[in-house]
Amino acid sequence: MDDFTVTPWKVEGVIDYDRLVERFGVRRMTGDVRARLARAAGGSHHLIDRGIFFSHRDLDAILKTAEGGGRFFMYTGRGPSGTTHIGHLVPWILARWLQERFGATVYFQLTDDEKFFAKPGLTLEEAGGHALDNALDFAALGFDPDRTRIMIDTRDIAALYPIAARVAKKITFSSTKATFGFTGETNIGMIFYTALQSAPCFIEDAPVLIPLGVDQDPHFRLTRDVAPVLGKPKPALIHSMMMPGLGGGGGKMSSSGDDAILLSDDPRTVEKKIKKRAFSGGRTDVAEHRRLGGDPDVDVSFQYLRFLFEPDDSKLERLREEYASGRMLTGELKQILIEKANGFLEEHRARREEIRPDLGSYMFG
Amino acid sequence: MDDFTVTPWKVEGVIDYDRLVERFGVRRMTGDVRARLARAAGGSHHLIDRGIFFSHRDLDAILKTAEGGGRFFMYTGRGPSGTTHIGHLVPWILARWLQERFGATVYFQLTDDEKFFAKPGLTLEEAGGHALDNALDFAALGFDPDRTRIMIDTRDIAALYPIAARVAKKITFSSTKATFGFTGETNIGMIFYTALQSAPCFIEDAPVLIPLGVDQDPHFRLTRDVAPVLGKPKPALIHSMMMPGLGGGGGKMSSSGDDAILLSDDPRTVEKKIKKRAFSGGRTDVAEHRRLGGDPDVDVSFQYLRFLFEPDDSKLERLREEYASGRMLTGELKQILIEKANGFLEEHRARREEIRPDLGSYMFG
């Protein structure tokens, strides 16, 4: 049964999303809820349409609020352990689109303390440095500075701690043990930390929607248990699948090593990484590939196009057909990804530099 | 063996201070160290001379610093669960005297979060209200506003949290379990909190001396284990005995109920409390008392005079002799205490009102 693990600090094995839905007790994004979201948003997004956001908790409640002309806000975040990689972007891109469609304020929490607690060799200063760098990546996606509040835990702790304290009083060590697998050897910063990740849920007096990687869901199970005790609505969640690393498989892109494409990777590095490392869904030789076709569902290049770099559904469908039929080779698919990814990254880096002087206007504090 | 308990949250049974010294592994205040402190301070204090500050950790290191002309700072605090009582004053009065003698800066931490975590029915707002009221009691003892920094945890968390995080990373749940008796049912705010109580120890780049009630020692055992890992000197401690409640015994004055004399008690209330409740070391009738004498060591009125209200050693000695010889009755001793205590409290309340407009100048934030 336990051939895969999904927690905020460890994703291992090949995730079976159907079984994860059961295990976590979340709800599948059905055609109905997707259509309802598209109606309320006045349009759709490929991350929703393609099932990359595959499950939710109480999204219906948020849609009901929006349909009735009510206000909700959003919250997402990142543990700043290093340079942002493309896998981190998935919930952020959806958050940006939702902000544009619903005019919702977005809180972005950079959890420098969490990464400091979790990584033995990381200093708080290093985590803080990564946080500012990551903040720039987030803002550069095109958020509206008037509706964006980027928080860094240690820097914005004055606003977060009193809320976290109210949450922490209602969570026992046993609950964190059951939820995260903590032991007697877990440090007390780590044990408390989940209360801080809950805090932005209650920072405004309105319902909150959290777009997030499904590995972060356990934190908010605790938050959702506590919310009614605090007289607050339960935060709603919309969960994305984990974007695979270059090595493929059903896991999560790792920040360390060569498994990730970093937002700072130059075009040559991107080309080399994809050519050398991107797991191929192709056959052992060209003749066999032409005859049997490739498997886009396991091909990492295709998956990156599907997650991020080919938002046009008809173009993506054409690539799928070409590749599955064997007319397109892995090398050709990789070349398309290299160009699209480098185009995206160069534009992103230009936008980063453009907004760098104004980063302050996106910050909470 | 375990016929008494001393932890930051529970003091029970009759404390045997000799056994406590062994159990906690602290060092007795010897005549030598008292003389050395008096030399360095250019004078002595009744709380030291009378053995009320009975033990220490590394006080010698602080004295060495002072003797060499080096700088140290001080830190003490209070959990603001309600109105200050006279028992709370013991470490504060020593801190004030040490400040005057050594020109040392004093940090005073009001742990509103701790009390909130520890008391099921207390709100954070209530704890914060008590904190401001307690701050006024502290400042009114005559501290130098230029060398006093009163902190309230939730209010000054921006300065405290990054230090607490560094401490928290080095403390496991097992350590807090062993030190405080925490269980799986302990809330995660409480578990983390000890890191916050440690934080002021490292707020300045100098050695720190902490005058405190001995029940708070367990927190700083953890802090002292962590200090070398952070490259910091271990905090030095000087421990006071617990001032008994009106009911006597060898325990600690309780904030709740009728066991305490509150700083806000009016003269009539003080008189009534002492007359009705102060445990008497006297005999069952006057004739027997005259013949056998009273026992000043268990008489609460005598103890309050000894701890706080009769700083003149020769006057206190005369009272001891009069009472022990049977020449003085409990009622007469109580009358002396009532007058001294009411004099002290009236002066204190006048001073509170006098400095109220300037409280800001004592605050850290």
Image (cartoon, coloured by chain):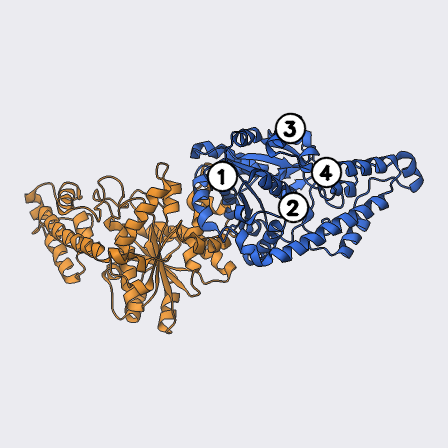
Chain colours: A blue, B orange
Kindly identify the residue that appears in the image at 62 percent across and 36 percent down.
A239
Q: CA distance from mark 4 to mark 3?
A: 28 Å
In terms of sequence position, does the residue under pointer 4 or pointer 3 come before the other? 3
Q: x, y percentage for residue A85?
A: 68, 49
Under circle 2, the secondary element is: helix
- Chain letter of mark 3 equals A
Is residue B152 toward the left or the right of residue B227 in the image? Answer: left
Q: CA distance from mark 3 to mark 2?
A: 26 Å
Under circle 4, the secondary element is: loop
Q: CA distance from mark 1 to mark 3?
A: 41 Å
Name the disc covering residue A250, or none: 4
Q: x, y percentage for residue B127?
A: 34, 44
Q: Determine if marks 1 and 2 fall on one subunit.
A: yes
Kindly identify the residue that appears in the image at 72 percent across and 38 percent down.
A250
Q: CA distance from mark 1 to mark 4?
A: 31 Å
Instruction: Indicate the quadrant containing the C terminus of chain B: top left, top right, bottom left or bottom right.
Output: bottom left
Q: Nearer the viewer, residue A188 or A340?
A: A340
Q: Residues within 10 Å of mark 4 (few under 14, many from 20)?
A: many
In terms of sequence position, does the residue under pointer 1 or pointer 4 come before the other? 1
Disc 4 or disc 3, which is closer to the eye? 3
Q: Determine if marks 4 and 3 fall on one subunit.
A: yes
Amino acid on which the number 1 mark rests in the picture = Phe
- In the depicted structure, whether residue B111 falls above or below residue B354: above
Under circle 1, the secondary element is: helix
Amino acid on which the number 3 mark rests in the picture = Ala
Can the viewer see residue B21 in this picture? yes
